[in-house]
Every structure is written in C-alpha cells, then in structure tokens.
Image: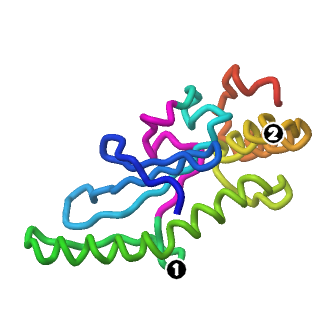
Amino acid sequence: KGTRFQRVGPSLSKNRGGVVQVVNLQGAQYGGKFAVNLGLQPLGIPNVVGDEVDPKNIKEVECAFRDRLTEDGYDTWWDYTSDAAAMDCAAKAAADLFVRRAPVHFQEQMQSISTITPDEAGRALPSYYVSLALLREAQGDIEQARAFMALAAKHASRHWVANSAIKHLL
C-alpha cells in the first residue's frame, strides 16, 4: 500500500504524511545474529540530536522515536551462521515478521506520539519527552509542550542541560 521504502545507505525509509518511517538491520557486536530497528521522525521537529531532518538521508539512530521490531514485545534477534541456508532462513523469518508487524507498529506508534498526553506518558528517557514536547509545539499545543519538557527535566540526570532550541519550553 502507498509508498515503498527507499534505500538510504544501510537503512530503508519512506515518508508517510510528514512522518518518515525508517528501518535498519543491526548486527550483533560479535556477529551471528541481527535485529530490525524501527524509527519514526516527524518532519516538523529536529531529529534526536537537534539537527534539521533530511528525509532522504535520515538514519534510524537519528529518529526522535525508535523501537525494535518484535513479535511479543520482547527483544527479538535472529540467529544465523555463515551457511547460506541459515542466513536465508533468518532473513525470511525477519521479513515475515516485518510484513506482519511493522505496518501495525508504525501505525500504533504514530497514533501514540500524536495523541499521548503528559499524564499518560509514563517513565521514559528525557529525549523521548523532549521529542514529544517539540512535536506538541509544532502542533500548536504549547501547554502540553511545556508539560512534556517538565517531565524531561524531572527524569533527567542532574548533569542534563536543555539546549537552546528547547529552553523556551521550560
């Protein structure tokens, strides 16, 4: 349905209604397994490091909202060996899960980041709250943007410093 994913270096991405969906394969540090990482980056806000987004060159690790493709919510890694049949089996299993779960995951995540309130956000990393604050600001909801920034400050380490792009929301 709709636009196809385009290759961007080691990642795949597509723009769906002003939100870039990014897919990346992450190999394990010592080899023999891989995971599928998913990222969402609204085009109206900076990426996770505060840079302007280039939708044609964004990497999953730069996305404001990131997750891993799973069947059941637990970290999923596919094992393989240098045997071509084992690699093929792992790739097919990951592709099957991607086809079944990724569209639903992206849709649910997009719905969540568009509608979640500060009271519903739970405990998360400050970067998550900052991204939600910037998204709410872009949507014109300054009250929620400030409430998300308050959560970022509350859950940050004592060494955290708000950058100049977000200080106005504190």
The image quadrant that residue 117 belongs to is bottom right
Q: Nearer the viewer, residue 44 or 130?
A: 44
Q: Secondary structure at mark 2?
A: loop
Left or right position of 36 against 163: left
Mark 1 residue type:
Asp
Q: Is residue 62 above or below residue 109?
A: above
Quadrant showing the C terminus = top right
View extreme (left): residue: 83
Residue range highlighted in magenta: 54-68
Closer to the N terminus: mark 2 or mark 1?
1
CB within 8 Å, label 2 to label 1: no
Identify which residue is drawn at 73% across, 42% down.
Answer: 152
Residue 165 pos. (x, y %)? 70, 23
Dot 2 corresponds to which residue?
139
In the picture, measured across the screen, residue 147 lies left or right of residue 126, that is right
* Amino acid type indicated by mark 2: Gln
Image spot of residue 33 (x, y percent): 25, 67
In the rendered image, the residue lying farthest to the right is 143
User: In the rendering, which numbered label is found on residue 28?
Assistant: none
Residue 65 at x, y percent in the picture: 59, 49
Comparing 35 with 45, the one in front is 45
Element marked by disc 1: loop
Displayed quadrant of residue 107? bottom right
Which of the pair 44/86 is nearer the observer?
44
Residue 98 drawn in magenta: no
Dot 2 crowding, Cα within 10 Å, few <14, some 14–19, many 20+: few
Q: Which residue is mark 1?
A: 72
Along the viewing direction, whichever of 74 and 9 lies nearer the viewer = 9
Q: Is residue 62 magenta?
A: yes
Q: Residue at x 77, y 35 (%)?
A: 138
